[in-house]
Image: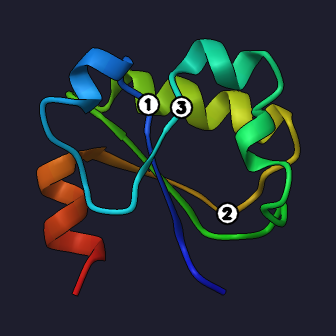
Amino acid sequence: MDKVIIDVREPFEFMTGHVKGALNIPPSKLMAGATKLQDVPKDAPIILYCRTGSRSAVAANILHSLGYTNLTNGINKDHVKARFLN
């Protein structure tokens, strides 16, 4: 199963640079039901990141409450690139 990478920063932050292929879904959109993820299986590996890891931790809690089970806080884009991308 392919991993899903989510940048939870605001769109203006996302536009300054992001992990290639990452979805931009800020926490407010996740709280509204995470409609961009409706086709993602609940057990799919999801890696979340922001700037410092705080918003991605909050986003992981939101997704967990929506039933997603395979969540990783990737902290920031540099950590995600180094740890999760080949």
* Residue type at numbered disc 2: Asn
What residue lies at 71% left-to-right and 42% top-to-bottom?
A: 36
Find residue 21 and report its horizontal and vertical position in percent. Answer: 38, 62
Q: Sequence-wise, which precedes: disc 3 or disc 2?
A: 3
Find residue 48 and report its horizontal and vertical position in percent. Answer: 45, 46
| Alpha carbon separation for disc pair 3 and 1 | 5 Å
- Looking at the rendered structure, the secondary structure element under dot 1 is loop
Look at discs 2 and 1 and give the one toward the viewer. Answer: 1
In this image, 45 relative to 14: left or right?
A: right
Return the residue nearer the eye: 80 or 25.
25
Residue occupied by mark 1: 8
* Residue type at numbered disc 3: Ile
What residue lies at 56% left-to-right and 19% top-to-bottom?
A: 27
Look at discs 3 and 2 and give the one toward the viewer. Answer: 3
Q: Sequence-wise, which precedes: disc 3 or disc 1?
A: 1
- Looking at the rendered structure, the secondary structure element under dot 2 is loop
Dot label at residue 32? none
Callout 3 environment at 10 Å: few (<14), some (14 to 19), or many (20+)?
Answer: many
Q: Sequence-wise, which precedes: disc 2 or disc 1?
A: 1
- Relative to 6, say whether 41 is above or below: below
| Alpha carbon separation for disc pair 2 and 1 | 17 Å
| Alpha carbon separation for disc pair 3 and 2 | 17 Å
- Looking at the rendered structure, the secondary structure element under dot 3 is loop
Callout 1 environment at 10 Å: few (<14), some (14 to 19), or many (20+)?
Answer: many
Quarter of the image containing the C terminus? bottom left
Contact between marks 3 and 1 (CB within 8 A): the answer is yes
Find residue 63 and report its horizontal and vertical position in percent. Answer: 72, 38
What residue lies at 54% left-to-right and 73% top-to-bottom?
A: 3
Residue occupied by mark 2: 70
* Residue type at numbered disc 1: Val
Residue occupied by mark 3: 25
Quarter of the image containing the N terminus? bottom right
